[in-house]
Amino acid sequence: MFFAKDFIETAEGLIFAVVGQSMEHDKVLCFLRYVPHRQGWRKVDTDVANDFLKQHHPHYLHYSPILDARLHAVAQPKIIKHHRPKHRLQQLLNADNHDAVEQDLLSLTRLFQQHGLDLANIGITGSLLIGVQQHGSDIDVVCYGREVFHHCRAVTAKLITLGQLQDLTEQDWQQSYQRRDCDLSFAEYVWHEQRKDNKAIINGRKFDLNFIDDCMDAGGRAPKVGADATQGAVADDRAIGAPDNYQKIGPINLECQVIDDTYGFDYPAEFKIDYEHIDSIISFTATYTGQALRGETVQVSGMLEQSSQGRKRIIVGSSREARGEFIKVVQ
């Protein structure tokens, strides 16, 4: 089974980040993140990844008719190693020697454990997953299960009030804002982020909490079929039967009320809205994960899509940078 935040490694030494559980034609949907470099790997951005595959490995480029998106895909026989966040964390917990990043990770996991979190439901992704972290690397924690994730958020908020973790400094927020490169003002970005309780500082190092829905929930909702944050749409998995194909209509900007934020931290995030003929807002960029709460009015700018069954939704994150696309609460 493959989950978002897993990494897969090919015989060519390429590392792809898995972007969802769904497979197409026995291929794992993913996006290239690391290429071979000297004795290890070098991280690449979206444009470099696409250009690299076009020049050297075009067979990994993939168009998904279900998602109406271009991303990457790897056939299972091409995968020589499956990097799993849960397994990697357990490996680090059992290791004898740790660098500075790993030591901070272990300190964080001890705090979580002390507040009732089962580390069997926690993993680690990003550079730590494949051991290419540098001294200044962040920690990307993966929480498996909705209750686990929200428990981690609550514990993080509590530990900040106790002084055992720290909130991000002005400089941290500025760096985070610059990395996101989003279409919000700095003040808007920080206001939305501070109330999410999904990031903090431990020993001067930033960490983030990521949610993965790894099982069917009580409502019978299957885990999402996802596309990378650099790409377009996903199939609506709440419909019974075959996924519903969506096609892009065009840009849209409007104000609406959020009526259900249950899946606001999912991948991709989903916000049900009260707006004529449009069901929901779907976000593929982490900037807008958990962005709004039920009952709030938001301004949204994105791409309107319509399904083969006539259902409409707004996609935010049809590109990685999501230029001109955003979700923000109307205060």
Image (spheres, rainbow, N blue to C red):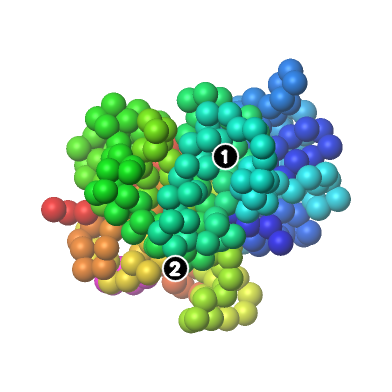
The location of residue 246, given as percent across then percent down, is 53, 63
Q: Which residue is mark 2?
A: 147
Relative to 183, 205 lies left or right: right
The image shows residue 134, relative to residue 17, as above or below, that is: above
Q: Residue at x 64, y 25 (%)?
A: 42
Tell me which segment is drawn in magenta: 272-279
Dividing the picture into quadrants, the one containing residue 27 is bottom right
* Residue type at tag 2: Glu
Residue 143 seen by the camera? yes
Residue 216: percent from left, percent from top: 57, 75
Quadrant holding the N terminus: bottom right
Residue 181: percent from the left, percent from the top? Answer: 37, 33
Question: Neighbour class for label 2 at 10 Å: few (<14), some, many (≥20)?
Answer: few
Where residue 126 is drawn, which disc sits there? 1
Mark 1 lies on a secondary structure that is helix
* Residue 143 against residue 192 in the figure, above or below: below
| Residue shown at 60% from the left, 37% from the top | 128
Q: Give amino acid for label 1.
A: Gly
Q: Earlier in the sequence, mark 1 or mark 2?
A: 1
Magenta stretch contains residue 169? no
Q: In percent of the image, x 48 and y 81: which residue is there?
A: 219
Q: CA distance from mark 1 to mark 2?
A: 23 Å
32 or 168: nearer the eye?
168
Nearest the camera: 91 or 210?
91
At numbered mark 2, what does the secondary structure look like: helix, strand or loop?
helix
Residue drawn where x is 51% and y is 65% of the image: 145
In which quarter of the view is residue 245 placed? bottom right
Give the foreground label among 1 and 2: 2
- In this view, 182 is above or below 193: above
User: Which circle marks residue 259 in the picture?
Assistant: none
